[in-house]
Image (cartoon, coloured by chain):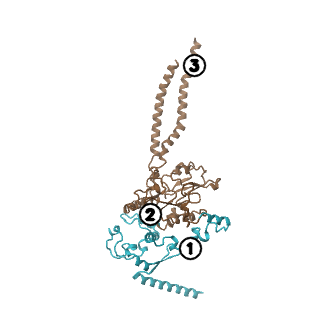
Chain colours: A cyan, B brown
Amino acid sequence: MKEKLLSMGLAVTAMVLFAGHVLGADRLQEPDTVAIASLSELYEPVEFDHAMHTDLADCARCHHHATGTGPATPSCGRCHPGTGAAADVSCRGCHAPDPFSAPNLKKLEEPGLYHIDKPGLKAAYHLNCLSCHRETDAPTGCQDCHAMTEAGQRRFYTGPFRPGMAAMSGTGASQGEKHE
Amino acid sequence: MSRQRAKRISRRGFLRGGLAGTAAVTVLKSNHAQAGHDFTGYPDAMGVIVDLTRCIGCRSCEAACNHEQGLPAPEKPFTDFSVFDELDHGEKRRPDEAHYTVVNRYEAEGLDHPLFRKIQCFHCNEPTCLTSCFVNAYTKTPEGAVIYNPDVCVGCRTCMVACPFSIPAFKYSSAFHPRIMKCIFCHDTRLTKGRPPACVDACPQEALTFGKRVDMLKVAHQRIREHPDSYVDHVYGEDEAGGTSWLYLSPVPFDQVGLDPDIQKEPILNNVTGFLSFVPMVLSIWPLLFAGFHLLATRKEGKEMQHEENGAGEK
């Protein structure tokens, strides 16, 4: 039993190290794909095809001034005219996954802080992705990018959890259909 | 003789009346000064910006609210966008006993895309539901939420009439246990634990931005200043109804997205404080005052009657 646990532990450690190595190697250049799993409770992770998107837009379009390729908007250029690449260019490097947590809200009180309205990670993705997808007629529906998990379907009362489906009473189901 | 008496009494009455009047005015004035205080909200009250330029109408906030507050299953899935076409008596959807918040769609002039507007309780700084409630079922908490206690509610529904935003809904399905249903800012489960309400957490676009109300006002004005072409230069809720915890930013005038632009810029309570401070005085002082007048008036009459009787007796 002990041996089994030990070997499993070793295997997991090896996997983690290997993954770390691969990620570390990728970070030197740019990633081909980025797995976005911020919403993994209700939605399956999104496999973002970074390589494909670099053909479609300049780095600054999404990374603002961080990649050192120049600011995307004049307002960024006021303070970041050509400051070179930032140490961390990942979205998460600037955009907090929990923007409304008490410590993050406390930071807003810092006197002289300019970026008092920095979107959190989830909003940074959606604001960036959706605005461009709308302009370019790319997919904009929620489930065009995210497949819902079962928890998501339960939350939204959809799929097998559609109103009337759970009870499976004939009248309930037909009522649900009638409304559409 | 009788005319002379009437004249004498009216003069004295006038003097006394004048005195009483002066006293009343003094009382009234001091009361008014007390009631007409300007409460601009708890300093650490939280707030939310609803930015209509960002909302995409995904209804995630509705689903999150339903889950967080344990509300009944909806008639249609939250992924069903046909609800935006629903009209009830010619009006778009409103929060009701099964929905603390709803998102509606608006076709605005001069825009090539529709706008979506979430609505819920605005959590006023000086809530009219609270001030209109005679059993004190409502509380404005220091965190900014307007919460409701069903245990003391008698179901009079005055709050529903008083609310300038028509938010409180009555649970008609439980008439014997009166219950108002309205957004409580996730007070018990989240706000008091330093967490944003469920709808804010669920919003993919940060169309809902959460923070201290004072900070949210700064953020809202900064957004307008940085993007003057994207917004109407007004933060709806900064002053409306005396200020609300929920603040709205819109690219079109607010009446085009179903928000009443004519709501007064001071607490609704201020409309009635003058009158209400007059009520205790009328009920307590007037009976004594007029009873006194009556007694004084009839005392003289009685004395003179006695005098006349005595005189007649002497003759």
Seen in the picture, residue B156 relative to B186 is either above or below; the reply is: above
What residue does disc 1 label?
A149
Please determine if labels 2 and 1 lie on a single subunit: no
At label 3, which amino acid type do we have? Gln
Seen in the picture, residue B138 relative to B222 is either above or below; the reply is: above
Q: Where does the image place residue B138, in percent across and percent down from the top left?
A: 55, 53
At label 1, which amino acid type do we have? Thr
Q: Where does the image place residue A66, in percent across and percent down from the top left?
A: 37, 74
Q: Where does the image place residue B133, in percent across and percent down from the top left?
A: 55, 49
What residue does disc 3 label?
B306
What residue does disc 2 label?
B112
Chain letter of the residue carrying label 1: A
Tag 2's secondary structure? loop
3D distance between C-alphas at marks 2 and 3: 92 Å
Please determine if labels 2 and 3 lie on a single subunit: yes
The local crowd at label 1, few if under 14, some if 14 to 19, many if 20 or more residues have their Cα within 10 Å, is some
Looking at the image, tell me whether mark 2 or mark 3 is earlier in sequence order. Answer: 2
3D distance between C-alphas at marks 2 and 1: 33 Å
- Towards the viewer: B307 or B193: B193
Please determine if labels 1 and 3 lie on a single subunit: no
Seen in the picture, residue B78 relative to B40 is either above or below; the reply is: below
Task: Answer whether residue B198 is visible to the viewer in this image.
Answer: no
Q: Say if mark 1 contacts mark 3, CB within 8 Å.
A: no
Tag 1's secondary structure? loop
Tag 3's secondary structure? helix
Task: Answer whether residue A155 is visible to the viewer in this image.
Answer: yes
Report which quarter residue B222 is drawn in.
bottom left
The local crowd at label 3, few if under 14, some if 14 to 19, many if 20 or more residues have their Cα within 10 Å, is few
Chain letter of the residue carrying label 2: B
